[in-house]
Amino acid sequence: MDTRFLTFMEFQSVYFYRFVTLAIFVTSGVLLLFAWPEMKRAEMAVIVPVLLILWGRFAVEYLRVSKSGPAFIHDDELVMSGVGGRRQIPLTRIRSVSSRHSVFMVRRYRSWTDHLAFLQVTLTNGERIHTLVESKVFEFPAGKTTLGAVQAAVLAAKTKTPARDPGAE
């Protein structure tokens, strides 16, 4: 199975680069405030909306990374590690798996093609669990190799488990 979940060390790298990107955005905001009195109305009409869109997207990704934790699949279970400890979720309890592209969260700034995708796992009880996987910039869907591998593992686990009769218990 070709899953490309991020390891704990790679998560630390993402947290570091998230901080660096936040520092760049704060610096650009402060510089914009100093340049505000000398700016013309046409310049403001272009720069301010663009920066607001970039800051908004970064805020969304910042929150998604905050909810994410390292994960891997082992013995028909999705194992999630995080601040709250380790959690093992049987693959049969997974209802759906989806992914979204990231714009600002890169693993390394050395390569423009090494981006991340946000992988969202929805359990049968409606709970959503988030993790990060490797992706390319123009890959559709985001992180498609890992997304396909997780979906295949979930399907294999569900077909391997015998169907229970709800009235038998």
Image (cartoon, helix red, strand yellow):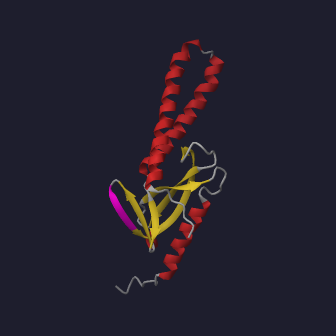
Q: Main secondary structure of the magenta part?
A: strand
Q: Residue 37 magenta-drawn?
A: no
Q: Residue at x 46, y 42 (%)?
A: 16
| Residue 31: x %, y % from top left | 52, 21
Q: Residue at x 33, y 59 (%)?
A: 85
Against 135, is 32 above or below?
above
| Residue 70: x %, y % from top left | 44, 57
User: Most extreme residue toward the top, as rendered?
Assistant: 38
Q: Residue at x 54, y 40 (%)?
A: 57
Against 106, is 92 above or below?
below
| Residue 158: x %, y % from top left | 49, 77
Query: Which quadrant holds the C terminus?
Result: bottom left
Region of the chain picked out in magenta, as a range: 84-88
Q: Residue 86 magenta-drawn?
A: yes
Query: Which quadrant holds the N terminus?
Result: bottom right
Q: Is residue 112 left or right of residue 5?
A: right
In this rendered view, identify the residue nearer to me: 10 or 163. Answer: 10
